[in-house]
Protein backbone atom coordinates (compact mmCIF):
# COMPACT_ATOMS: atom_id res chain seq x y z
CA UNK A 1 0.00 0.00 0.00
CA UNK A 2 1.41 3.39 -0.94
CA UNK A 3 0.78 6.69 0.78
CA UNK A 4 2.65 9.45 -0.98
CA UNK A 5 6.30 8.53 -1.12
CA UNK A 6 6.08 6.09 1.82
CA UNK A 7 5.57 2.39 1.55
CA UNK A 8 3.52 0.76 4.29
CA UNK A 9 4.05 -2.95 4.70
CA UNK A 10 1.52 -4.97 6.63
CA UNK A 11 2.71 -8.15 8.22
CA UNK A 12 2.87 -10.09 11.41
CA UNK A 13 4.31 -8.26 14.39
CA UNK A 14 6.43 -10.23 16.79
CA UNK A 15 5.45 -9.52 20.36
CA UNK A 16 7.72 -9.83 23.36
CA UNK A 17 5.20 -11.51 25.62
CA UNK A 18 6.17 -12.09 29.24
CA UNK A 19 9.69 -13.33 28.68
CA UNK A 20 10.87 -10.31 26.73
CA UNK A 21 9.30 -7.79 29.08
CA UNK A 22 10.78 -9.55 32.08
CA UNK A 23 14.27 -9.73 30.57
CA UNK A 24 14.26 -6.01 29.84
CA UNK A 25 12.97 -5.29 33.36
CA UNK A 26 15.76 -7.39 34.88
CA UNK A 27 18.36 -5.45 32.90
CA UNK A 28 16.75 -2.12 33.77
CA UNK A 29 16.58 -2.97 37.48
CA UNK A 30 20.34 -3.45 37.57
CA UNK A 31 20.83 0.03 36.04
CA UNK A 32 18.67 1.90 38.58
CA UNK A 33 20.34 4.18 41.09
CA UNK A 34 19.84 3.15 44.71
CA UNK A 35 17.26 5.92 45.17
CA UNK A 36 15.38 4.97 42.00
CA UNK A 37 15.48 1.30 43.00
CA UNK A 38 14.05 2.10 46.43
CA UNK A 39 11.22 4.10 44.85
CA UNK A 40 10.51 1.37 42.29
CA UNK A 41 10.39 -1.21 45.08
CA UNK A 42 8.00 0.99 47.06
CA UNK A 43 5.69 1.37 44.07
CA UNK A 44 5.73 -2.34 43.22
CA UNK A 45 4.68 -3.15 46.80
CA UNK A 46 1.50 -1.08 46.24
CA UNK A 47 0.22 -3.52 43.62
CA UNK A 48 -2.57 -5.77 44.84
CA UNK A 49 -0.82 -8.75 43.22
CA UNK A 50 2.36 -8.23 45.26
CA UNK A 51 1.66 -10.99 47.84
CA UNK A 52 1.09 -13.52 45.05
CA UNK A 53 4.26 -12.41 43.28
CA UNK A 54 6.29 -12.92 46.46
CA UNK A 55 4.71 -16.32 47.08
CA UNK A 56 5.57 -17.41 43.52
CA UNK A 57 9.31 -16.75 43.87
CA UNK A 58 10.99 -20.16 43.85
CA UNK A 59 13.53 -21.12 46.47
CA UNK A 60 17.06 -20.86 45.16
CA UNK A 61 18.88 -24.19 44.75
CA UNK A 62 21.84 -22.93 46.79
CA UNK A 63 19.55 -21.82 49.66
CA UNK A 64 20.52 -18.18 49.28
CA UNK A 65 17.97 -15.59 50.39
CA UNK A 66 15.40 -14.68 47.76
CA UNK A 67 15.86 -11.31 46.08
CA UNK A 68 12.23 -10.35 46.60
CA UNK A 69 12.60 -6.77 45.38
CA UNK A 70 14.27 -7.70 42.10
CA UNK A 71 11.92 -10.61 41.45
CA UNK A 72 8.76 -8.62 42.11
CA UNK A 73 10.02 -5.73 39.95
CA UNK A 74 10.59 -8.15 37.08
CA UNK A 75 7.16 -9.72 37.60
CA UNK A 76 5.57 -6.27 37.64
CA UNK A 77 6.88 -5.73 34.09
CA UNK A 78 4.01 -7.85 32.77
CA UNK A 79 1.34 -6.68 35.20
CA UNK A 80 -0.28 -4.41 32.60
CA UNK A 81 -0.52 -7.38 30.21
CA UNK A 82 -2.39 -9.34 32.86
CA UNK A 83 -5.17 -6.83 33.47
Image (cartoon, rainbow, N blue to C red):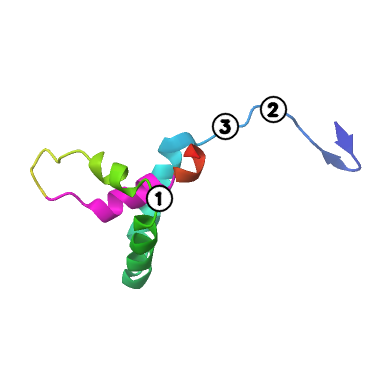
Between tags 2 and 1, which lies in front?
Answer: 1
Q: Which residue is mark 3?
A: 14
Span colored in magenta: 65-77
Residue 76 inside the magenta-drawn segment: yes
Residue 46 inside the magenta-drawn segment: no
Q: Residue at x 50, y 36 (%)?
A: 16
Cβ atoms under marks 2 and 1 closer than 8 Å: no
Residue extending furthest toward the left: 63
Q: Secondary structure at mark 2?
A: loop
Cβ atoms under marks 3 and 1 closer than 8 Å: no
In whole angstroms, how far apart are the C-alphas of marks 3 and 1?
Answer: 18 Å
Answer few, some or many: residues within 10 Å of disc 1's Cα (few below 14, many 20 plus, some between 14 and 19). Answer: many
Residue 74: numbered disc = none
Between tags 3 and 1, which lies in front?
Answer: 1
Q: Residue at x 34, y 65 (%)?
A: 37
Viewer-nearest residue: 1 or 57: 57
In whole angstroms, how far apart are the C-alphas of marks 2 and 1?
Answer: 27 Å
Amino acid sequence: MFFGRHVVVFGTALAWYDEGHMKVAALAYEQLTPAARAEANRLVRLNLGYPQWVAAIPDSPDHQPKDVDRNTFVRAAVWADDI
